[in-house]
Amino acid sequence: MPLATATQAGLQDCYLDYQRTYMAFRNFAEATRRGYAADLRLFLRYLADKVSVTTVHKVERAHLHDYFAELDRRGQAGATRARKLAAVKSFFSYLEDSGIIERNPAKAISRPKQELREPRVLTEGEYKRLRDASQHHRRDRALIELFLQTGLRLSEVSSLTLGDLELPPRQRLSRRRGIHRSEAVPR
């Protein structure tokens, strides 16, 4: 979009162009694309509904500060606000790089502090109940043990493939003339 039409550039049209071209060009992961798209839609809705801004040239740094202050008032965590800011910064960087805007209103906005939370640890009773609940189902038992013993997240476990597993070779013990040795058994 040439700079001459920047004053008429609608936020929605720019968002769609950002989605079609920039996200694909940057090779964002599918989860990142979905997250950024959802975050930007909420931001654009805020601009349209709360401050009546629908064109890119009318977006000011104060609008961004107000939006992120509103998210903070709603109790959104620092990590959530940081992700939303990353989406907004990426969007306005694209607009600036494309020549649609001359000044990026998101450039100097600093990242919100993220709260440090201690991980919740299962009590001994919870740990035992979880293991007992899965004792009759081999698949469930394996998944529960994987969670309990590794600390992996659900998303990490669900994305595992057989190629990610490094199983030890099968061993057999053999005795030959009083010598004990183990050897790998072919699969």
Image: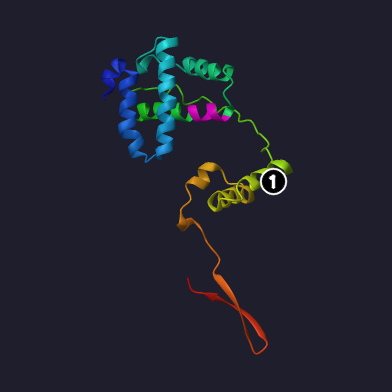
Give the farthest residue toward the front. Answer: 136
Please identify the quadrant where the N terminus is shown: top left
Badge 1 amino acid? Lys
Q: Splitting the image into 4 quarters, where does residue 22 fall?
A: top left
Residue 155 among magenta residues: no
| Model colouring | rainbow
Q: Position of residue 186 (x, y in %)?
A: 49, 74
Q: Splitting the image into 4 quarters, where does residue 10 fall?
A: top left
Residue at numbered disc 1 = 128
Q: Position of residue 187 (x, y in %)?
A: 47, 70
Q: Position of residue 156 (x, y in %)?
A: 52, 45
Residue drawn at the location 50% of the way across and 25% of the way down: 108
Does residue 98 appear in the picture of this structure?
no
Above or below: residue 150 compared with residue 112: below
**SS class of the residue under badge 1?**
helix
Q: Nearer the viewer, residue 42 or 8?
A: 42
Q: Nearer the viewer, residue 149 or 23?
A: 149
Above or below: residue 71 compared with residue 179: above
Q: Magenta region, mostly helix, strand or loop? A: helix
Does residue 63 appear in the picture of this structure?
yes
Q: Splitting the image into 4 quarters, where does residue 129 fall?
A: top right
Q: Is residue 5 left or right of residue 159?
A: left
Residue 83 among magenta residues: yes
Q: Nearer the viewer, residue 187 or 107?
A: 187
Residue drawn at the location 47% of the way across and 15% of the way down: 63
Q: Position of residue 87 (x, y in %)?
A: 44, 29
Residue drawn at the location 51% of the way across and 58% of the way down: 165
Above or below: residue 98 compared with residue 68: below
Task: For label 1, count other residues whose C-alpha is less than 10 Å away and answer few (under 14), some (14-19) or many (20+).
Answer: few
- The residue segment tinted magenta is 79-85
